[in-house]
Image: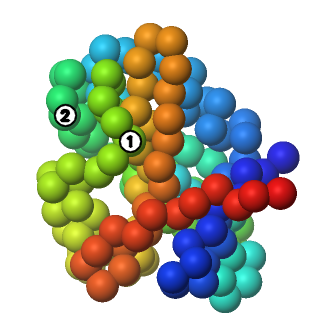
């Protein structure tokens, strides 16, 4: 089952499978109280809708309570593999990471990182996604963002 998120100002929809969110929650709990993260791969459903198809975690990284830096080698390999196996349909969509004992709001460092990704010549999207999970021992909260015109716009969960 997909969780549907919408960004009304930009007219965008994002579909996040519950299974992927549960995987992220599990990884966040395993690495708590340190930050952890990964990337999203997925595809366009249509001109305004994107589907996240998987999350990939790095095999090498450095993390502590307030930072997470991933090494890109295995992530790049996974992006290329998924792209080739899907005949160019699945590609890099964006990033996710945790804020242990913090909120899911993005920091200035998060914004600058997303701007760097969006401006990179080696990244296929100018509008990367960012999911931040604020996690505490007993609960977690997420926020999803998309980079557009060097600003992060928050998605809201669609109401049924």
> Is residue 15 visible in this depiction of the protein?
no
Q: Measuring from the top left, give residue 79's x and y in whole percent.
A: 50, 58
Which numbered disc flags the more N-terminal residue, 1 or 2?
Answer: 2
Q: Which mark is residue 104?
A: 1
Q: Determine the image quadrant of residue 36.
A: top left
Q: Is residue 25 above or below residue 82?
A: above
- The residue beneath circle 2 is 67
Q: Measuring from the top left, give residue 49's x and y in whole percent.
A: 68, 76
Side of 158 where 42 appears, left or right: left
Mark 2 surroundings within 10 Å by alpha-carbon count, few (fewer than 14), some (14 through 19), many (20 or more): some
| Image quarter hosting the C terminus | bottom right
Q: Which residue: 37% across, 15% down?
A: 32
Mark 1 surroundings within 10 Å by alpha-carbon count, few (fewer than 14), some (14 through 19), many (20 or more): many
Question: Is 35 or 145 nearer to us in this picture?
Answer: 145
Q: Which residue: 38% across, 41% down?
A: 104
Label 2 element class? loop
Q: Which residue: 44% across, 37% down?
A: 133
Q: Measuring from the top left, give residue 156's x and y in whole percent.
A: 57, 60
Q: Measuring from the top left, give residue 25's x and y in whole percent.
A: 55, 27
């Amino acid at each position: 089952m997909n969780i549907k998120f919408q960004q009304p100002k930009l007219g965008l929809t994002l579909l996040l499978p519950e299974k992927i969110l549960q995987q992220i929650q599990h990884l966040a709990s395993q690495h708590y109280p340190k930050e952890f993260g990964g990337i999203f791969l997925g595809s366009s459903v249509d001109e305004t809708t994107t589907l996240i198809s998987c999350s990939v975690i790095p095999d090498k990284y450095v993390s502590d309570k307030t930072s997470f830096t991933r090494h890109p080698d295995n992530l790049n390999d996974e992006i290329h593999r998924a792209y080739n196996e899907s005949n160019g349909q699945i590609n890099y969509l964006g990033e996710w990471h945790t804020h242990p004992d913090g909120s899911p709001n993005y920091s200035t460092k998060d914004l600058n990182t997303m701007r760097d990704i969006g401006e990179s010549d080696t990244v296929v999207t100018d509008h990367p996604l960012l999911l931040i999970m604020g996690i505490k021992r007993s609960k977690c909260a997420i926020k999803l963002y998309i980079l557009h015109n060097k600003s992060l716009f928050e998605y809201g969960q669609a109401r049924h």
